Image: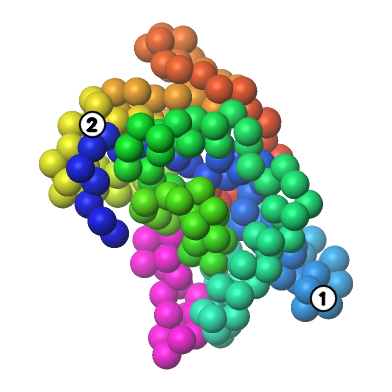
Amino acid sequence: MTLPIGPAAFFDVDETLITVKSMFDFLAFRYQVEGRPESDYARDHRALRRLADQGVPREEVNRAYYRLFAGVPEAELAEQGEQWFRTRTEAGELFHAPALAAFRRHTEQGHHTVLVSGSFPGCLDPIARHVAADTILCSRPLVADGILTGELEQPMIGAAKAAAARDLLRTAGLDPQECHAYGDHSSDLDLLRLVGHPTVVGEDPVLTEHADRGGWSRLPGLGHGAAAALTT
């Protein structure tokens, strides 16, 4: 990572910069290309949904997702991530146009652009290359001898997003009040409150209340699917 020398712009990814929940969309894609029955995806999604419904912390649900990849070669997931990205971009409408336009404006202004997500490099690396993002802050599966162990270094969820962003700003010596952040879910609140220029994407009631009170910027959103509160 090259340290930023000017204001940073932090972007949540799923249903902010892109139109899908990358982890679940990728999981369905992976099972499909491997010829697995749709019932396998339905079973695993249902198990994660059950954890969330039982009140298991979102960080732990995020960890449970990555246990599905225990024993999988890191290179295999990276290649499938590239395939997933190509398939989705060729089909069109992967990127959320208002957020992508905002991202492009920050790039044109020379801002340091940062993707912040509970998703993982297999999905995020091709997205970052496509938009020329400068930095990725994300959940990183632990790897031993090229194989995923099923565990994580740190789920990039909720407060962890703000902590990682704060560390980047501190290391670079940047003033948070000069920086920007974009998010669509209440779990992004700490990240949005960290900067001087927060933007709420969509209609999350917690975020819109803060936007109304604080005069924050707004962008239209997509709404949230069934997986919205599970992992990112």
- Between disc 2 and disc 1, the foreground one is 2
Is 43 located above or below residue 130 in the figure?
A: below
Is 157 located above or below residue 60 in the figure?
A: above
Residue drawn at (23%, 31%) of the image: 176
Q: Position of residue 113 (x, y in %)?
A: 38, 43
Residue drawn at (79%, 61%) of the image: 42
Residue drawn at (61%, 67%) of the image: 81
Q: CA distance from mark 2 to mark 1?
A: 46 Å
User: Does residue 92 show up?
Assistant: yes
In this rendered view, identify the residue nearer to me: 43 or 92.
92
Is 218 located above or below residue 194 in the figure?
A: above
In this rendered view, identify the residue nearer to me: 109 or 173.
109
Q: Is residue 215 left or right of residue 147?
A: left
Q: Report the number of discs.
A: 2
Residue drawn at (56%, 73%) of the image: 78
- Helix or strand or loop: what does disc 1 sit on? loop
Q: Position of residue 118 (x, y in %)?
A: 48, 53
Q: Which disc is residue 36 wearing?
A: 1
Q: Which disc is residue 176 wearing?
A: 2
Pick out the residue farthest to the front: 108
